[in-house]
Image: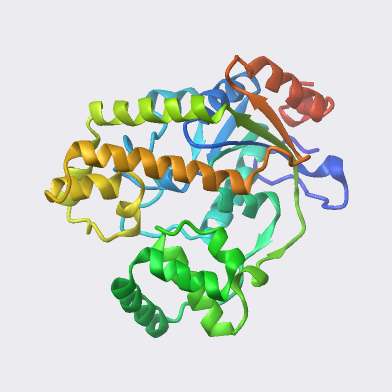
Amino acid sequence: MSASESSVPEILVEDHKAKIPVVVILGPTAVGKTAIAIQLAEKLNGEIISADSRLFYRGMDIGTAKPTRQEQLRVPHWLIDIAYPDEIISLAVFQKKAEHAIQNIYRHHHLPFLVGGTGQFLRSIIEGWQIPPVAPNPSLRQALQQWASQLGANELHAKLALLDPLAAKNIDPSNMRRTIRAMEVILTTGKQFSKQRRKGDQPYDLLLVGLSLSREALYQRIDKRLDGMIEAGFIDEVRHLLELGYSPTLPTLSAIGYAELVATIKGNITLEEAIVLMKRRTRNFVRRQANWFKMNDPLIHWFDVSSNQVGNIERLIIENFNGRLDKILMRQ
């Protein structure tokens, strides 16, 4: 393998040992993925690629539990603050950016860590999805958006479930943008959206590490984290985004926490009511995340983080790549 940093090492898909090694750290929100990934990347000369769709957007820091500036200085991070809140990072765009990041990290003899809880984005890399090549249909999309404004997000999602139950199962009912896109593809092609997602060749040697915690303990962490966000100025963050001119109807501002605090700022609900709704929505989100990555999945190595597991995960990574890390990281 060439040590040159000007060209990407050749990837031979049929040769397991020639594939780019990638460690995937996955698990539910608030389980501690960020802290553990940073510790592992420090120990193994790694860099972190975010697969959390909420972290893409500038100015959305507190409410997304984005790694702090200090944390980002400890280990290089990719795909954080790459767009403004009124821009859309689609699944296809994420794939391209993530693949570019993996190639660059590997080229510089570092170990890529793909970290996040957005199941669809993670699966697209893990399974090598090929996104349906359906061009946007502006007139149809506008009609769907108007219909959605009349029906509401939940009712529109119910309509999608009638057309494509599997697609609906994998889309958050509150994520109107993704619901509309799925319906747009279905109505344009006459085929179910879920059946148009194909798997391609997998150029990576993946190690999937799942972080788990009992549901009760996880809910306690969620409640504590949300309370901490409020204390850290979450409502001021949302108010600032609105003052900058970002519409409260943007998909980004419909995310958990942002929508509730927009309603608080507008005087529609109290802060106490908003916090209750935020905690409820986050718990529902955790349950949906579990549908993407199941505890009985034989490809995922699960670790209960109620005790310190960093050393155990580090040993798993070293053993899994069977001495390849020295060559990958140029330590031979």
Picture quarter containing residue 320?
top right
Asked whether residue 205 is in view, the answer is yes
Q: Quadrant of the C terminus?
A: top right
Q: How many labels sit on residues?
A: 0
Q: Residue furthest left?
A: 267
Up-down relation of residue 276 to residue 317 (above or below): below
Query: Image point 35% across, 73% down: which residue?
Result: 148
Q: From the viewer's side, name the closer residue of 225 and 108.
A: 225
Q: Position of residue 255 (x, y in %)?
A: 35, 50
Asked whether residue 79 is in view, the answer is no
User: Is residue 83 found left or right of 311 in the rendered image?
Assistant: left
User: Is residue 286 found left or right of 143 in the rendered image?
Assistant: right
Picture quarter containing residue 164?
bottom right
Picture quarter containing residue 134?
bottom right
Q: Tell me, what colour scheme is on the image?
A: rainbow
Q: From the viewer's side, name the closer residue of 120 and 22.
A: 120
Query: Image point 50% across, 27% down: which residue?
Result: 216
User: Is residue 209 found left or right of 56 in the rendered image?
Assistant: right
Q: Position of residue 217 (x, y in %)?
A: 50, 24
